[in-house]
Image (cartoon, rainbow, N blue to C red):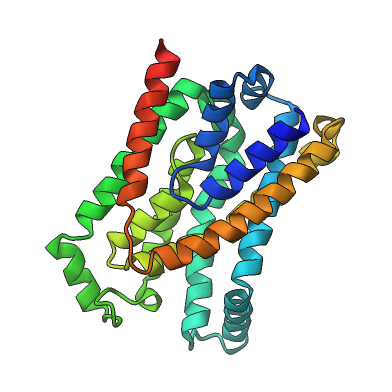
């Protein structure tokens, strides 16, 4: 991997990890389109320099998210610690913190057990293109389902915010657990973690702004934990000869992730997932045709 490849993949990771279009899917598809055969081969190998590269991307993206939401995290962590002292959940910040913990557990366990296996089996360009198309269908389905009367009834039953949607602090713990289960789909290259989490929130009555906020907050500990867990890949033999490239790519990923979450936090106050769904359908179909020929 040279420095240009590292920076391009870092920028791609930082943007597509938060945009609902699958960072892993793009990191598999893009090198194939650009003819980077060494990276394509490394992605599905049991051990390779690409594993070390992913560690840097994960940590940089998580740190960018933590930097953007640092005020939220101060309140959330304070709320959780306070609830442990009093043994009661008395504030919305404490409740949000415990919801994030519950939602992190399913994806965390499945990622720990199966991330490596899923990456080596499914990180293939043609499969990633197919799953990117499926991701587009999931986003479209979320937009259609959120308009159903049943979803509006769920929102109304739990209290509405000024936008007419459900308040995030009314989420139940079992619902957070289901959202965590939804995130398991992101182990497949082409399925977006942020997208599938947002869809799960939308169909339970959240508006786009709160669904995106919950998705971004939930991504922070999961991505950071994945990076820390895989640190041996970076510090061991897989990282030999590529530490400079990993550092350059990580800086690019961190900057791109920070700018992306800043943009999307404003975007989803008034906009929907539909443009991203269309992009995934078109890009996934075009890439699938290209790789099948």
| 210 sits left or right of 101 in the view | left
Residue closest to the eye, 31 or 183: 31
Whole-percent x, y for residue 193 in the image? 47, 48
Residue 130 location, quadrant? top left
Residue 53 location, quadrant? top right
Name the residue at 43% across, 49% down: 20
Residue closest to the eye, 163 or 271: 271
Name the residue at 51% across, 53% down: 18
Q: Is residue 269 visible?
A: yes
Q: Is residue 230 visible?
A: no
Whole-percent x, y for residue 158 in the image? 26, 78
Q: Residue furthest front?
A: 4
Residue closest to the eye, 198 or 77: 198
Above or below — where is 187 with respect to 219?
A: above
| 53 sits left or right of 175 in the view | right
Whole-percent x, y for residue 179 in the image? 40, 57
- For the C terminus, the quadrant is top left
Name the residue at 62% across, 82% down: 78
- For the N terminus, the quadrant is top right
Q: Residue furthest top?
A: 293
| 184 sits left or right of 163 in the view | right
| 2 sits left or right of 150 in the view | right
Name the residue at 43% across, 28% down: 129
């Amino acid at each position: 991997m040279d420095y240009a490849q590292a920076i391009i993949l870092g920028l791609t990771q930082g943007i597509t990890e938060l945009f609902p279009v699958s960072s892993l899917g793009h990191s598999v598809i893009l090198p194939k389109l650009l003819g980077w055969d060494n990276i394509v081969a490394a992605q599905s190998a049991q051990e390779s320099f690409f594993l070390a590269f992913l560690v840097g991307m994960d940590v940089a993206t998580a740190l960018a998210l933590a930097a953007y939401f640092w005020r939220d995290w101060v309140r959330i962590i304070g709320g959780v610690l306070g609830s442990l002292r009093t043994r009661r959940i008395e504030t919305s910040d404490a409740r949000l913190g415990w919801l994030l913990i519950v939602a992190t557990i399913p994806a965390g366990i499945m990622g720990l057990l199966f991330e490596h296996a899923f990456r080596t089996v499914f990180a293939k360009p043609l499969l990633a293109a197919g799953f990117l198309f499926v991701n587009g269908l999931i986003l479209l389905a979320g937009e259609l389902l959120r308009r159903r009367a049943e979803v509006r009834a769920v929102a109304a039953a739990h209290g509405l915010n000024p936008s007419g949607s459900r308040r995030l602090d009314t989420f139940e713990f079992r619902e957070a657990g289901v959202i965590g289960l939804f995130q398991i789909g992101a182990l497949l290259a082409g399925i977006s973690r942020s997208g599938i989490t947002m869809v799960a929130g939308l169909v339970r009555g959240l508006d786009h702004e709160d669904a995106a906020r919950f998705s971004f907050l939930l991504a922070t500990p999961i991505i950071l934990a994945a990076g820390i867990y895989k640190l041996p890949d970076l510090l061991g033999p897989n990282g030999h000869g590529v530490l400079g490239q990993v550092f350059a790519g990580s800086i690019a990923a961190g900057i791109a992730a920070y700018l992306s979450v800043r943009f999307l936090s404003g975007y989803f106050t008034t906009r929907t997932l539909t443009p991203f769904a269309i992009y995934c359908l078109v890009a996934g179909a075009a890439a699938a045709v290209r790789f099948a020929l």
